[in-house]
Image (cartoon, grey):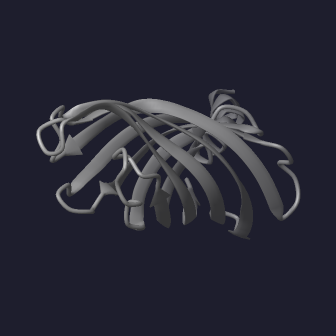
Amino acid sequence: MKSLRYLAVLPLMAAAAQALTLDVQLGYGKPNAPLSGGADADNTSVVGLGIGTYLTENSHLGLNLSTRDIVTTDPVDAAARTAIVEYTYELNSTGGIKPFIGAGIGYGWLKNTAKSTALASDVFAGMRFEVTESVDFTVTARLHQLYNVDFANVVGEENRQVNSFEAVAGLRFKF
């Protein structure tokens, strides 16, 4: 009878094992002009790593760690590393193509700005394509925002909002 109890738990363990995910992301971003009267910011690369879990068949909660330049024009060379908790909802969880939408909020660590931290958020939409049972390919369009960024130490501007429109491709590994 004891062995039957163990057999009953095996499907639950298998379901829990499939719930964890690891995302590897690489993309391209176009920040807005964060300095008044300044030139547009240079295009930038976006590199990210995420870890998460499926809450239900259609919803996913994860932590996205990423890095990007936010201004690379003279005299400012600022960059940001962010940690954002993201909620993703899949609009159709069946089939090979799975469209999704999501939003997240978190924290940013800044380089070469007057303040070393900022509030960060993003909203996104995309599609996930199943490559194998345990690997998906993702394509995402994202609006990434940093709030109250100060360039006072360089150009005398405070409390700027930096928006970046990003196109990101990635792989999701499901464990």
Using the image as rendered, state which of residue 60 and residue 39 is in the foreground.
39
Quadrant in which the N terminus appears: top right
Q: Residue at x 20, y 57 (%)?
A: 77
* 140 vs 111: above or below: below
Question: Residue reaching furthest bottom?
Answer: 131
* 18 vs 118: above or below: below
Residue 158: where, in percent of width, then height?
Answer: 26, 30
Quadrant for residue 75, please give it.
bottom left
- Residue 87 makes an appearance in the image: no
- Residue 2 makes an appearance in the image: yes
Using the image as rendered, state which of residue 121 and residue 31 is in the foreground.
31
Using the image as rendered, state which of residue 104 and residue 129 is in the foreground.
104
Residue 130: where, in percent of width, then height?
Answer: 73, 66
Q: Residue at x 15, y 35 (%)?
A: 114
Residue 33: where, in percent of width, then height?
Answer: 42, 52
Question: Residue reaching furthest front?
Answer: 37
Q: Residue at x 41, y 56 (%)?
A: 48
Using the image as rendered, state which of residue 170 and residue 11 is in the foreground.
170
In the visual, does 50 lie left or right of 100?
A: left
Residue 117: where, in percent of width, then height?
Answer: 24, 32
